């Protein structure tokens, strides 16, 4: 974090009345405004319900209050917020938006620093980017940035086309591709943990590690996002971005510094070293009826808005190999699913057992491997599992753990969007996905996209299809 004063910005949120804006962006913006880091104004460029400035301010106040922002403590009249509809997505509407922006910049005496934030479904990105460029909003003499939400493309080809389109109007140094997992403190802490604790880094390789498992399990179902989700599925929604980002941070080499290019360079090297994933190493699943946390849950195809015949996957487990000096031959398992037994995001590193057992009563298989579990959410923290001798006249080796939990040591952890927005304002691209990174990731997963030959069914409230357990020779796939 650098303490430099941030110059004034006008942020234009396309999708300013949408779900993402309401639930994530606006609360984060309010919390950042509380810190008074910069002079900051925003236009909600709405694609949904119509507003004027006054009703939009009211809408935002209610939305952020619903998300836990204390309006009294905030003491804000929301006078920094404006509204302008771009609902039809026409060039004419963007001309009107451009006029409004110029008018406000003049009235507020702003230097033309603009952030365009696309908080809209991916199908809207190309049109919005093109219109912003065509009406000349990408030029002002000030500092201009473009923030794009995930998923960036649907596959390799569409990601390349989208990159080409964006690069027609913006340079790479102006583009901030969001993967909100990178904004999570605990995900960033993977870097801190690895590169500030030499003890672990010296064990971080194929000689000492037996396998790595990255799990993002959610109890929620598809919710109100049927239209989006049924076309996308878990591979595109979670694996290609969030889990792969975690993977690159776990597996990358030591960057020369924490600047954006050094870190992103190392992440891309990991992606390029991953061998093509064999279809036999991927298990797809879809939830059926069941009970989650004691409550009955309907099956995926019974959800509102989902095609009854849908074969879209809500669960993916896959095994991959990073073919480089550090990791060759070590299985990395990525798993994610909706309507799972419980919500947990964790990285489990299993270390190799000792080469032989000197304890006569145990074979080497009876000695538990050391494990490091990094829990990214909820109950963020670390557990290091090791064996001890139980007091007594013979050797019994129960496993114990060293435990650290963020919540017990630090106060409130900032939300990912607060961190990411601040980085956009400061111009730090370290936690954003570079164009070659997004393309390398799609290159890896595009051959695995639909139609899948076999989508196993699993009951809501379980850990997914049994077939997924076979990816690790039948070992159970969660620590708890
Ligand atoms: C989003 C996905 O990117 O991440 C959702 O589209 C998923 O399907 C969500 O539920 C999970 O994010 P978090 O921060 O709740 O783990």
Image (cartoon, grey):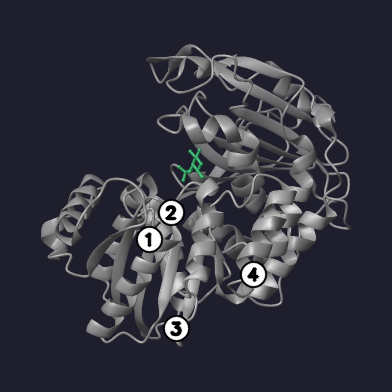
Q: Residues within 10 Å of mark 2 (few under 14, many from 20)?
A: some
The answer to whether 124 appears left or right of 326 in the picture is left
Q: Which residue is mark 2?
A: 89
The answer to whether the residue labelled 1 contacts the one labelled 2, judged by CB atoms less than 8 Å apart, is: yes
Q: Residue 140 got which mark?
A: 3
The answer to whether 399 appears left or right of 355 in the picture is left
Whether residue 230 appears in this view of the structure is yes
Percent position (x, y) of residue 426? 45, 77
Secondary element at tag 2 = loop
Viewport quadrant of the C terminus: top right
- Whole-angstrom CA distance, mark 1 to mark 2, is 7 Å
The earlier-in-sequence mark between 3 and 2 is 2
Nearer the observer: mark 2 or 4; the answer is 2
Q: Residues within 10 Å of mark 4 (few under 14, many from 20)?
A: some
The earlier-in-sequence mark between 1 and 3 is 1
Residue at image point 53% right, 44% down: 375
Secondary element at tag 1 = helix
The answer to whether the residue labelled 3 contacts the one labelled 2, judged by CB atoms less than 8 Å apart, is: no
Whether residue 343 appears in this view of the structure is no
Residue at image point 52% right, 25% down: 340
Percent position (x, y) of residue 183? 49, 59
- Whole-angstrom CA distance, mark 4 to mark 3, is 17 Å
The earlier-in-sequence mark between 4 and 3 is 3
- Whole-angstrom CA distance, mark 3 to mark 2, is 22 Å
- Whole-angstrom CA distance, mark 2 to mark 4, is 20 Å
Viewport quadrant of the N terminus: bottom left
Secondary element at tag 4 = helix
Nearer the observer: mark 3 or 2; the answer is 2
- Whole-angstrom CA distance, mark 4 to mark 1, is 23 Å
Q: Which residue is mark 1?
A: 93
Q: Which residue is mark 4?
A: 167
Q: Residue 411 got which mark?
A: none
């Amino acid at each position: 974090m650098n303490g430099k004063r941030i110059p004034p910005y006008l942020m234009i949120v396309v999708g300013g009345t949408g779900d993402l804006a309401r639930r994530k962006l606006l609360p984060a913006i309010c919390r950042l405004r509380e810190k008074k880091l910069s002079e900051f104004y925003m236009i909600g460029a709405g694609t949904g319900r119509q507003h004027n400035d006054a009703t939009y301010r009211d809408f935002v106040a209610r939305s952020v209050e619903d998300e836990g922002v204390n309006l009294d403590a905030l003491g804000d009249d929301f006078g920094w917020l404006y509204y302008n509809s771009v609902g039809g997505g026409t060039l004419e509407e963007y001309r009107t938006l451009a006029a409004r922006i110029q008018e406000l910049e003049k009235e507020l005496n702003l230097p033309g620093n603009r952030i365009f934030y696309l908080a809209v479904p991916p199908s809207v990105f190309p049109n919005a980017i093109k219109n912003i460029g065509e009406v000349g909003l990408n030029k002002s003499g000030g500092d201009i940035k473009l923030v794009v939400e995930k998923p960036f493309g649907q596959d390799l080809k569409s990601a390349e086309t989208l990159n080409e389109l964006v690069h027609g109007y913006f340079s790479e140094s102006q583009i901030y591709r969001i993967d909100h997992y990178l904004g999570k403190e605990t995900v960033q802490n993977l870097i801190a943990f690895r590169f500030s604790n030499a003890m672990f880094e010296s064990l971080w390789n194929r000689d000492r590690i037996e396998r790595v498992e990255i799990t993002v399990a959610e109890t929620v179902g598809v919710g109100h996002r049927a239209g989006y989700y049924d076309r996308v599925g878990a591979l595109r929604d979670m694996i290609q971005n969030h889990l792969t980002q975690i993977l690159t941070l776990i597996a990358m080499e030591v960057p020369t510094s924490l600047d954006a290019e050094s870190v992103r360079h190392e992440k891309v090297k990991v992606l390029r070293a991953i061998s093509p994933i064999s279809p036999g190493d991927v298990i797809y699943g879809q939830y059926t009826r069941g009970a989650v946390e004691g409550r009955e849950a309907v099956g995926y195809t019974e959800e509102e808005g989902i095609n009854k015949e849908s074969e879209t996957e809500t669960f993916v487990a896959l095994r991959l190999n990073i073919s480089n000096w550090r990791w060759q031959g070590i299985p990395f398992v990525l798993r994610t699913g909706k309507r799972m037994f419980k919500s947990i995001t964790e990285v489990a590193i299993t270390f190799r057992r000792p080469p032989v057992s000197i304890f006569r009563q145990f074979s080497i298989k009876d000695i538990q491997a050391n494990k490091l579990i990094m829990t990214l959410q909820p109950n963020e923290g670390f557990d290091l599992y090791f064996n001890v001798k139980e007091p007594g006249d013979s050797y019994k080796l129960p496993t114990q753990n060293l435990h650290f939990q963020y919540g017990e040591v630090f106060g409130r952890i900032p939300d990912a969007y607060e961190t990411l927005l601040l980085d956009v304002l400061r111009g730090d691209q370290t936690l954003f996905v570079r164009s070659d990174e997004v393309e390398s990731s799609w290159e890896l997963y595009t051959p695995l996209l639909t139609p899948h030959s076999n989508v196993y069914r699993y009951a809501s409230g379980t850990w997914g299809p049994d077939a997924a357990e076979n990816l690790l020779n039948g070992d159970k796939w969660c620590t708890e």
